[in-house]
């Protein structure tokens, strides 16, 4: 509904000021509308992922509470015949205590998980500007950090060469990687499902989207190593071609979202959990 209202407003504005409005103004309005639509879709997906993580823990917690209620009911019945069931009562009490401990453990795990995700997200995004955050998506899922970068921010059009515009953002991401020096880093290239242009492919030795995604990941790895001093022993370059989409390829906006490079940071579990006790730095 919001999108329809926005389009009607743009259309009305164009009719009223049609005599002085230019094609450039219309294109700007359309681009702004696309950006709003993309941001709205990203927010929906992030919210859905968060709800799924919380739902899983809540299901476990609900099941534990059901088990606790069943045990409590058995205990109540046993208490009515205490003289005959002393051994059973002691066993049930032990089981109830174990159930209580499990419930407390689930609550603690959920709390730590939420705190950890918040700390890591703050640490990873504190140096990025508002403009950069429009093209850089940071998520923490099950202890793994995913930094997703739009292809038009990183590469020259139709190429795997890094453009000048990407330098500042890559330098900030390199600093994050160097701050967590014991973490492994996978650079993963992804494309849409549009075949590589035949003439361009022959000149650049790119046969298909597999080649393009691998070469783009390799370009980012080499930039992190050669220009920003990241230890190459920590880096892995890989490509997934068109076979790891985050949405369908039915529109230009969807294809643009699928054309991305992901930087995946995987810390060791003990180091990862230690982050909970560290306050994130201010931007």
Image (cartoon, rainbow, N blue to C red):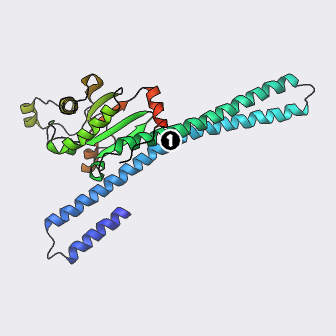
Quarter occupied by residue 37: bottom left
> The residue tagged with tag 1: helix, strand or loop?
helix
Dot 1 alpha-carbon crowd within 10 angstroms: few under 14, some 14 to 19, many 20 or more: some
Q: Judge by depth and name the residue closer to the eye, 166 or 38.
A: 166
Q: Give the residue at x 62% y 38%.
A: 61
Q: Whole-percent x and y of residue 9?
A: 29, 70
Horizontally, residue 160 falls left or right of residue 115, namely left
In this rendering, position of residue 114 left or right of residue 137: right
The residue that mark 1 highlights is 114
Residue 12 lies, in percent from the top left, at 26, 73
Relative depth, front residue between 188 and 203:
188
Query: Vertical placement of 34 versus 5: above or below?
Result: above
Q: Residue at x 14, y 36 (%)?
A: 161
* Residue 56 x %, y %: 54, 38
Would residue 192 be visible to someone looking at this image? Answer: no
Q: Residue at x 31, y 52 (%)?
A: 38
Residue in the image at 31% along x and 57% along y? 36
Q: In the image, is residue 52 above or below residue 186?
A: below
Q: Taking 207 as reference, is 1 left or right?
A: right
Vertically, is 179 above or below 13?
above
Q: Is residue 186 visible?
A: yes
Q: Quadrant of the N terminus?
A: bottom left
Percent of width and height locating residue 11: 25, 70
Pick out the residue farthest to the right.
83
Q: How many marks?
A: 1
Q: In this rendered view, identify the residue nearer to me: 44 or 193.
A: 44
């Amino acid at each position: 509904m919001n999108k329809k209202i926005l389009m009607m407003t743009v259309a009305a504005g164009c009719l009223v000021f049609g005599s002085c409005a230019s094609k450039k103004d219309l294109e700007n309005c359309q681009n702004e509308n696309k950006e709003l639509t993309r941001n709205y879709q990203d927010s929906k997906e992030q919210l859905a992922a968060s709800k799924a993580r919380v739902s899983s823990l809540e299901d476990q917690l609900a099941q534990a509470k059901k088990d606790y209620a069943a045990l409590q009911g058995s205990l109540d019945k046993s208490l009515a015949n205490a003289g005959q069931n002393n051994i059973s009562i002691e066993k049930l009490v032990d089981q109830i205590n174990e159930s209580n401990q499990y419930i407390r453990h689930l609550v603690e795990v959920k709390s730590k998980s939420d705190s950890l995700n918040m700390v890591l997200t703050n640490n990873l995004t504190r140096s990025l500007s508002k403009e950069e955050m429009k093209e850089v998506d940071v998520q923490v899922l099950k202890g793994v950090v995913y930094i997703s970068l739009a292809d038009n921010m990183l590469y020259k059009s139709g190429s795997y060469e890094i453009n000048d515009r990407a330098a500042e953002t890559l330098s900030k991401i390199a600093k994050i990687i160097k701050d967590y020096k014991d973490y492994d880093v996978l650079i993963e290239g992804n494309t849409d499902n549009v075949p590589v242009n035949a003439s361009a492919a022959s000149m650049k030795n790119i046969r298909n989207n597999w080649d393009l995604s691998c070469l783009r990941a390799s370009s980012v790895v080499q930039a992190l190593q050669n220009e920003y001093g990241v230890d190459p022993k920590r880096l892995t370059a890989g490509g997934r071609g068109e076979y790891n989409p985050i949405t369908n390829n039915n529109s230009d906006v969807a294809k643009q979202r699928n054309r991305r490079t992901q930087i995946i940071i995987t810390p060791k579990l003990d180091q990862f959990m230690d982050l909970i006790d560290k306050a994130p730095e201010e931007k």
